[in-house]
Image: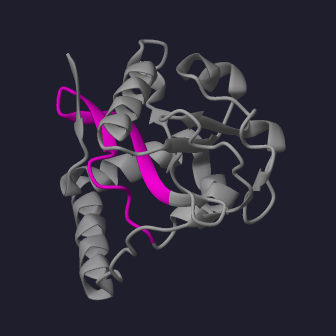
């Protein structure tokens, strides 16, 4: 049985592996990644789907501005493990993330994605015509969902990263963790 819950610190490695499998290294070159890097996701808006203790899907929302002085969230990335696709997990994650954002009082959600997929959740390019990303992006894939009526009326300008900065990584701990992982792999071989 699949359970959806808030992401925990212990889920991060599994989430990263899932994102690597879903998007590959190209995910780090995406313009939307520029808005996420060095930032923490919005509180309570990082969700995972877990099946028998294994992370099988993930979604996060991040604080951004939809032009000067206009708060919004950026959704992404959304990923579902290849063995769990077409089971409704992505749909459930999306609905849960949108509902949580709305309940928390957020005004709008932006994303870069497929209009045919995200349109069923109410996302459209209609309100993003005067917004742009910090880098190359496909204008037809810049979508928005107003969580409050008129939240994006007149939105114009650069979409910028806001929110909390991520703490600097503890490099010594990362090296130790990597060495321990290598040791486990060599013992298993």
Residue 50, visible in the rendered structure = yes
Residue placed most toward the observer, 165 or 151: 151
Query: Which quarter of the image is occupied by the N terminus?
Result: top left
The magenta-colored residue range is: 39-63
Image quadrant of residue 133?
bottom right
Residue placed most toward the observer, 139 or 90: 139
Residue placed most toward the observer, 96 or 83: 96
Q: Is residue 47 magenta?
A: yes
- Which residue is at a point 43% across and 22% down the rendered structure image? 83
Query: Which quarter of the image is occupied by the C terminus?
Result: bottom left
Residue placed most toward the observer, 175 or 51: 51
> How many numbered badges does the structure rendering display?
0
Q: Main secondary structure of the magenta part?
A: strand
Q: Pinpoint residue 134: horizontal percent, then vertical percent.
A: 73, 65
Q: Is residue 45 magenta?
A: yes
Q: Pinpoint residue 127: horizontal percent, then vertical percent.
A: 71, 38
- Which residue is at a point 59% across and 49% down the rendered structure image? 24
- Which residue is at a point 48% across and 35% down the rendered structure image? 148
Does residue 124 lie above or below 188 as drawn? above
Residue 189, visible in the rendered structure = no
In this rendering, would 80 be left or right of 171? right
In this rendering, would 45 be left or right of 62? left
Image quadrant of residue 136?
bottom right
Does residue 140 lie above or below 87 as drawn? below
Does residue 117 lie above or below 38 as drawn? above
- Which residue is at a point 43% across and 48% down the rendered structure image? 61
In this rendering, would 127 be left or right of 165? right
In this rendering, would 34 be left or right of 173? right
Q: Pinpoint residue 4: horizontal percent, then vertical percent.
A: 25, 29
């Amino acid at each position: 049985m699949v359970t959806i819950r808030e992401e925990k610190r212990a889920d991060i490695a599994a989430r990263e592996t899932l994102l690597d499998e879903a998007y590959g290294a190209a995910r780090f070159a995406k313009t939307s990644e520029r808005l996420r890097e060095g930032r923490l996701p919005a509180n309570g808006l990082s969700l995972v789907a877990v099946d028998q203790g294994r992370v099988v899907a993930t979604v996060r929302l991040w604080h951004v501005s939809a032009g000067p002085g206009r708060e919004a969230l950026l959704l992404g990335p959304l990923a579902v493990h290849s063995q769990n696709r077409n089971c409704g997990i992505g749909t459930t994650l999306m609905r849960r993330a949108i509902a949580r954002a709305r309940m928390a009082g957020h005004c709008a959600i932006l994303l870069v994605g497929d209009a045919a997929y995200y349109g069923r959740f109410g996302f459209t390019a209609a309100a993003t015509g005067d917004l742009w990303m910090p880098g190359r992006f496909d204008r037809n894939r810049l979508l928005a969902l107003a969580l409050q009526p008129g939240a994006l009326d007149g939105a114009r300008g650069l979409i910028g990263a806001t929110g909390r900065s991520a703490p600097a990584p503890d490099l010594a701990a990362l090296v130790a963790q990597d060495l321990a992982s290598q040791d486990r792999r060599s013992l298993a071989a």
